[in-house]
Amino acid sequence: MSNPSAETLQPLTPDEEALVRALGQVMYVLPRTIDADMVGDRQLPLTEYTALMNLSEAPDRRLRMHELAALCYLSLSGMTRTIIRLETQGLVKRERCEEDARGWNAVLTDAGFARLEESWPSHLAAVRRRFLQHFEGHDLARLARAFRQAGAAETTD
Amino acid sequence: MSNPSAETLQPLTPDEEALVRALGQVMYVLPRTIDADMVGDRQLPLTEYTALMNLSEAPDRRLRMHELAALCYLSLSGMTRTIIRLETQGLVKRERCEEDARGWNAVLTDAGFARLEESWPSHLAAVRRRFLQHFEGHDLARLARAFRQAGAAETTD
DNA sequence: AACTGGTCCTTGATTGGTCAAGCAAATACT
DNA sequence: AGTATTTGCTTGACCAATCAAGGACCAGTT
C-alpha cells in the first residue's frame, strides 16, 4: 500500500470510474436506508437485527461474544454495547461460559426470537426493494462470490 | 414498507441469500478498510478525501454547502463539520456567497489541492485492491448502472 | 505453588455522524 | 413598507461506533 506498483496506478477506465462512484454512493446510502426502513417499521436497527439473526441460527441460540462480533462485522467493544442494548430490552441474556469463566455467551431469549420473527418481513422487504430488485437478470451467484472476496478484508498490507 | 405485498415476502432463493449476506459484509467492511488504508498512508480519511475531490472538480473549485453535502452523501450538518475539520488544516476555506448572503462556499485552497494530489494514488490503489480487482471480467458498466439505481435512495415510502 | 504471559470481555475517552432547534438573510403577501 | 414564511447553514444534544487500557481468568514454566 505504501508503495503501490506502477501497474496499480493506471488511471481508471470510464467504466471503472463509474463503478467506483456508484460504489461510493451505495456504501453510504444503502446501510442508512435499510436501517431507516427497519427502524421506521419495527424499531429494530440493522445492527441489532443482525445480532439477533446470527444468534437465532447458532446452535442452542447462543454464541460467544467474539464469535458474534465476527459474524456481525463489529468490533468486540461494539458488540458488547449492542448486546447491552438488547439485554435491556429483554431480547438477549448473557450467561457465563461454563468451560471458560472469562467468557460470556449471548443467548437469544424467547422474546428476542419473537421480535426477530416480527421483524424479518420488514428486513426482507427492505433488502428486496433497496437492493436485490436492481440486480434482476444478473448472475447472482457470481456477484456474491465477488462481493465476498471484496469483503474478505485481508489486512495483509 | 409498512404493508409489504405478499409477493415481496417470497423467501430468498439461495443465490439471493448468498448475495445479501455478501452485501452485508461489503457494506460494513469496505468503507472501513478503504478508509483505514488511506488514513494509514496519508492521514486523509475517506470523507475528507471525497469532499476535496468533489471540490477539485467543481468550477472555480468552490461549491455551496448543500451541493457538496449531496455529492458526498452526507447530511448538511455532517458536511459543516467536515469542512470545519478541513478548514483548520488549511485545506479549504469558507467564503460568503455573493449572490445570497445566507450561503457559504467551500473553496479548495492550493494546499488542499496539493494534499489531494498527494493522496489520490493511495485512494486509487486502495479502491483497486479492495474492490475493482474482484470484479475483473464482469460487465462493469452494467454493474455500475445497477449500483446507481440501488443508491438512488428513493425516500418514497 | 507462585509467577508470567496471553486471552476474553468490559470500560473510558474520543470520533464522526445524525436530528432538531436556532439564527440570519431572502422572499412572498397584503 | 411591514410582517410572515421559507431557505441556508450552524449549533447543541445525542448516538453508535472505534481504540486503548484495565480486570478477571487461564495455561505454561519453574
Image: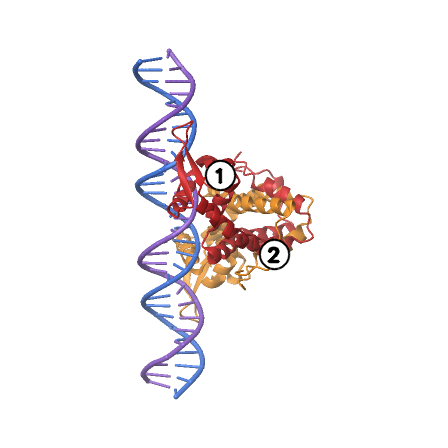
Chain colours: A orange, B red, C purple, D blue
> Which percent across, then down, holds residue D8?
42, 31
> Which percent across, then down, holds residue B106?
43, 38
The residue at 53%/40% (across/down) is: B57
- Viewer-side residue, C21 vs A25: A25
Tell me the quadrant of the picture where the N terminus of chain B can be found: top right
Horizontally, residue B83 falls left or right of residue D12, namely right
Horizontally, residue A45 falls left or right of residue A3, namely left
Chain letter belonging to callout 2 = A
Which residue is the site of mark 2? A8
Q: Amino acid at mark 2?
A: Thr
Task: Please give the label number shown on residue A76.
Answer: none
Asked if residue A113 can be seen in this view, the reply is yes
> Which percent across, then down, holds residue D11?
32, 39
Which residue is the site of mark 1? B61
- Element on which disc 2 rests: helix
Q: Residues within 10 Å of mark 1 (few under 14, many from 20)?
A: some
Q: Amino acid at mark 1?
A: Arg
